[in-house]
Amino acid sequence: MTSRLPVRAAALAAATAVVGVLAAAPALATGPTLSSGNGDVKVVNTETVQVYTSSTGEIQTRRVYEQLALTGHGTVDLSNPVSTDHLRNLDGFGGFTVKDGRQITRTTVDGDKRLRSVSNFDGKLPLDVSVAYKLDGRNVKPGDVVGKNGHLEVTYTVKNVTARPQQLTFDDGKGGSVTKTVPVPIPIVGSLDITAPSTFTHVQSEAANMAGDGKGGTKMSFTMTLFPPIGTDTAVFGYSADITDGVVPRAEISALPVNPLKSPTFKSAAGSYQGGADSGVQLTEGAGLIDSNLLKLRDGAAQLLDGIIALRDGAQQLQAGLAGQAAPGSDKLAAGAGKLDAGLGLINDGSKQLKAGTGKAYDGSQQLKAGTGKLDTGAGQLADGQHALEAGLKTLSTGVQGLPDAVTEQLKTNADYQSALQALQLTVFGIGGLGDSPAPTFGSPTLLGGINGVQYALRAPGTTDCATTRQNCGALDAIDGVIALLGSTGNPTDAAAASSLATVVGGLDARLLGKGLPAGTLGGLDRIRGGLSNPFPDEVTAGVTSTNVEEQHAAAKRMADYCAAHIADAPHKCGVEQVAQALRAGVPLLVDTLTNQISDQLLAGIGTPTPGCNPKKTLRCGAAALSDGVDQLAAGAGQLDAGAGQLSAGLGQLDAGAGKLSGGLGQAKDGSGQLAAGAQKLAVGLGQAADGSGLLADGLGKAADGAPKLVDGAQQLSDKGTKKLVAAGQDTAQTYGESYAVFKAGAERASTEDMAFGAPKGAMGLTAYSYVIEGEDGEAAHNWGRGIAGLGVLGAGAGAFALRRRLA
């Protein structure tokens, strides 16, 4: 962010230029004339509200510049509504007469005359502005762009926030009207202008008008129509560029309310919306007449249909007897016989495969009998090894139980561990308390005491004595005296110097001491204090000094949890001192916890082989279960050996039965083939008879089918055509009617609410809004350092400067 002083000066000049341009506009020359009895004077009042925002759109300052442009000859009395907050005269050092929020002026005009003023603007702004930045695809803060290389994307969002709900009435397209509540904003148009420097290349934007600035940079202008129905209340646009040694360029928004019914640019659009509403009404009436005639055609076609249907029904009964029952029955008989023949063939093949499989199964059962004998011998050997595993796990459990006490005793004599605890305690002592003295009577100085010393050097606590002994007088207190001295000389140059010093002092008070900042916003010194120390609540530290180990552990856990929960808060609720306290109390707890956890986890994993325990949870329970399973395996192996012999005998009997089944199924297959051939011949004959009766039924069926289509077609044309045309006409009338109503309501608001404060009675008034979105170029940090260094020079030279001004 650049230095504020030259920016403010440029803003004042720009605002004055805007006022001058508005006053000189040809349209204003036809403004009303005020008569005072001594002549005629034309008066035009222009208000320019100028807003400065940060590079992300947060509002920093806002002022309103008032200008009364008087043309003619005579004396005129004016009562101009103004903002009285820090109201200042831009044409001299004299003040204004203000009564009930109005600037009271009596002046004589002989030709042209200008009366200009500026004051703080505390009204509601019509636009909400926000800016977002991406560097190489990542969301970043504006300051992160400064000095960087990469691909920059900037998005501006400008929203018209003047909308308020209004009840609007318009034609419903059916001969009546409809009332609807819709948001209606004050119509506002504007533009955003920005110049990208020569270090921005490949500048692209889908919404901007772009041109070179003659210096290697790129000028971009975005236009905005911030009111419906021509536009929307929100405009989102931006640009992208490849940057080298990046900066964030400054952008400016110019906006003003406009009456769209009087503006040549928008007046034709209003006529289009009104014409659309009228066309919707005409479309509804014509479609209704067509629909009534289509319904008459539908009724005549229905009478013709009744006669054709009676003839068709008789033909269909004949066709149903042959084609619907006899022919399908014969087809089913032929198909069933064929399926029976095919199925018996599959079964016959399967019986042969079964015979071959039973023989193989019998051979396998003999091999199984030999393997089960070997399994029985191996199971016995496995049981012996498992009993030895159970004994080893019992010995391991006894050794783990003595682990925690041994670790604790070693840490008591460990120099590194004890040194770490002492270092954390010294950190707490070195930071100190928020109220520590800069030069303590007893003990050593602390960081927080030193910060308090910096603050007292800037602003002395209590009553200052800069004019006497200067024992209690800070640097800024001394500069306040210089400002007062310069302001009392009556010299315009001194007054300007006093104003500049006051701006510097105000900035230091705000940035370092937090003076004048919004509630919840901290100055620089308070931010440093909060980062160093922000004491725990009493309920968090309760028990930390207790002799009871469990209470100490509970307090340490609460402190650690508190810091973890509030580490991202702003302002910080857990400073460096609190983190050190939490670590000092928590390290012994961590050691005890980790040692016990290791012991507990090992013991939990080894476990105890109690009856019913889960063998998947602990080693000893699993070993016991495995031992039992191995014993069962040894017993089962013997039973398996006996069962294998029985299986082999049974498979021999099954093989003999499969041979008999295969022979019987071969005979059944021969008979099913003869049945399938006879059924096929019957199906062919009945199919030919059904075809002839179907030709007669089809002809009458087509005639009967055609007549309903005429009836249905007329009905569908009514339902899907003309009725939809009626609905479309009503929708068109309402849509365009609502748009024109919003258009008209916005124009009415523009006529009555276009000024921020209002113009004197009988004068023409206009209001324009100027938003300056400040950039970032890295100079703010340098200017801040130079400003701090210069304070000493200002303080040392203030007396000599004031003396020279007096002598001059």
Image (tube, helix red, strand yellow):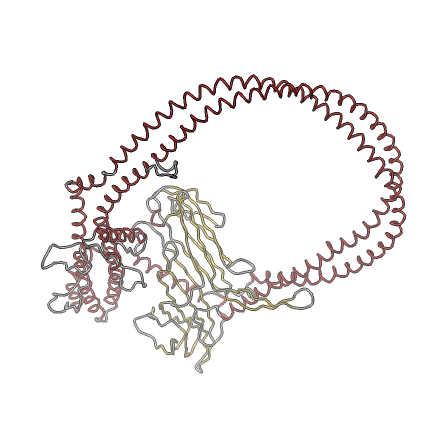
Q: Position of residue 574 (x, y in %)?
A: 27, 54
Above-or-below relation of 165 to 630? below
Residue lying furthest bottom: 37
Q: Nearer the viewer, residue 657 or 515?
A: 657
Q: Is residue 748 left or right of residue 89?
A: right
| Farthest left residue in view | 441
Q: How many marks?
A: 0
Of 682 and 633, nearer the camera is 633
| Front-most of residues 568 and 717 | 568
Q: Where is 482 relative to 613, above or below?
A: below
- Residue 69 pos. (x, y %): 42, 70
Query: Is any part of residue 569 visible from this angle?
Result: yes
Which residue is painted at 27% across and 39% down in the image? 599
Residue at position x 44%, y 81% in the image? 36
Q: Position of residue 288 (x, y in %)?
A: 75, 61
Quadrant of the snapshot with the C terminus? bottom left
Residue 1 shows up from this direction:
no
Q: Is residue 765 left or right of residue 340?
A: left
Note whether 558 is above or below 748 in the view shown.
above
Q: Where does residue 628 sit, x and y in percent of width and height?
A: 39, 31
Viewer-proximal residue, 402 or 332?
402
Q: Name which quarter of the figure residue 55 lies in.
A: bottom left
Q: Is residue 643 left or right of residue 467?
A: right
